[in-house]
Amino acid sequence: MQISMYAASVPVFAKMLGNLSAILDKAAAYAEQKKIDPAVLLNARLYPDMFALTKQVQIASDFAKGAVARLAGQEPPKYDDNETTIAELKARIARTIDYIQGFKPEHLDGSETRDVELKIRSETVKYPGLTYLLQVAQPNFYFHVTTAYGILRHNGVDLGKRDFVGKV
């Protein structure tokens, strides 16, 4: 049995980004309830050398839109990374979901063997599409979504596994 590149990317990224947006709703409600400045949560990190919540959400968004665009043979759109509120992060997520859902299965047909080139620091690396999706894009995407979840959970937001996984 073969799974389509579309099915392994667009709906997966869109669902998890939707879950991340719902997690941010819980963070906003928690900040309001506890009378915490939401900026405290947005700037929180799990460890001093890790990115803060805001950057984790931005990077998750970047991996989703970047993966789908690259698999379709397109250049991903650039976002400014200037979000400073939960509402702005949610808007970025919504924009990313809209963008990736604009792709149709036929846009990704055959992308499992299409070379994807990435410039990582000063080096250019090339992956076949399937390797890129399953071994680069998805693991990085999940890392940043999970870290965003972990930051909020660590800071007291009432989150559980169901918030992360969402409804199946």
Image (cartoon, rainbow, N blue to C red):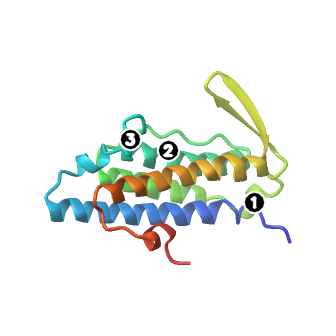
Q: Position of residue 100 (x, y in %)?
A: 59, 56
Residue at screen point 45% across, 55% down: 93
Q: Amino acid at mark 1?
A: Met
Cα distance in 3D space between marks 3 and 2 = 17 Å
Q: Position of residue 74 (x, y in %)?
A: 69, 43
Q: Is residue 66 left or right of residue 113?
A: left
Residue of label 3: 47
Do labels 3 and 2 touch, CB within 8 Å?
no
Residue of label 1: 5
Residue 27, quarter of picture: bottom left
Residue of label 2: 59
Residue at screen point 61% across, 25% down: 121
Q: Is residue 47 left or right of residue 11?
A: left
Say which element carries label 3.
loop
Residue at screen point 64% across, 21% down: 122
Locate the C terminus and report the quarter of the image it occupies.
bottom right
Say which element carries label 1.
loop
Q: From the viewer's perspective, is the residue at label 1 or at label 3 nearer? A: 3
